[in-house]
Image (cartoon, rainbow, N blue to C red):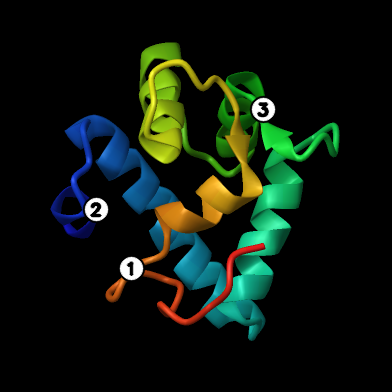
């Protein structure tokens, strides 16, 4: 797994984020949009209250809306994987982008993160 090579701490969370990545790749191709545009749109979709953060509840709800069902433990692991810490409970935009930032991932290394 690409994400595991980045030092992921949870195989289950890495696999879950990989499913999201694949969905974003398909949507980018199908809609003829740039990957950066798709990531920005995805973050706005997940951040239901426009707070600038994705809560675990928002993440779960948004993924369910995309046909991806994860239990609360998996969602918690995904948030921890995104934030890199066990005490962070919400995902900000910069960390959301970093999930997909990799030589083989969606974002090219030179893409600036907001």
Most foreground residue, 31 or 105: 105
> Distance of mark 2 from mark 1, alpha carbons?
9 Å
Residue identifier under label 3:
58
91 with respect to 43 (left or right): left
Residue 51 % position (x, y): 82, 34
Q: Which is in the foreground here, disc 2 or disc 3?
A: 2
Residues at discs 2 and 3 in contact (Cβ within 8 Å): no
For image coordinates 79% across by 35% down, the residue present is: 48
Please tell me whether mark 1 sits on a helix, a strand or a loop. loop
For image coordinates 22% across by 41% down, the residue present is: 8
Residue identifier under label 1:
102
Residue 6 vertical position relative to residue 108 in the rendered view, above or below: above
Dividing the picture into quadrants, the one containing residue 91 is top right
Residue 53 % position (x, y): 70, 35
> Distance of mark 1 from mark 3, alpha carbons?
25 Å
Please tell me whether mark 2 sits on a helix, a strand or a loop. helix
> Distance of mark 2 from mark 3, alpha carbons?
23 Å
Residue 98 % position (x, y): 46, 56
Q: Residues within 10 Å of mark 3 (few under 14, many from 20)?
A: some
Residues at discs 2 and 1 in contact (Cβ within 8 Å): yes
Q: Where does the N terminus fall, quadrant-wise?
A: bottom left
Q: Where does the C terminus fall, quadrant-wise?
A: bottom right
Please tell me whether mark 3 sits on a helix, a strand or a loop. helix
For image coordinates 44% across by 24% down, the residue present is: 75
Residue identifier under label 2:
3
Residue 17, labelled with which disc?
Answer: none
Residue 81 vertical position relative to residue 35 in the rendered view, above or below: above
Q: Who comes first in sequence, dot 2 or dot 3?
A: 2
Q: Residues within 10 Å of mark 2 (few under 14, many from 20)?
A: many
């Amino acid at each position: 797994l690409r994400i595991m090579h980045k030092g992921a701490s949870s195989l289950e969370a890495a696999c879950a984020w990989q499913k999201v990545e694949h969905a974003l790749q398909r949507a980018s191709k199908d809609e003829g949009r740039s990957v950066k545009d798709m990531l920005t749109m995805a973050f706005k979709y997940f951040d239901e209250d426009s707070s600038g953060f994705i809560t675990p509840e928002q993440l779960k709800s948004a993924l369910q809306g995309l046909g991806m069902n994860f239990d609360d433990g998996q969602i918690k692991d995904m948030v921890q994987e995104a934030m890199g810490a066990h005490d962070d409970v919400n995902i900000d935009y910069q960390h959301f982008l970093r999930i997909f930032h990799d030589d083989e991932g969606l974002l090219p290394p030179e893409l600036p993160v907001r």
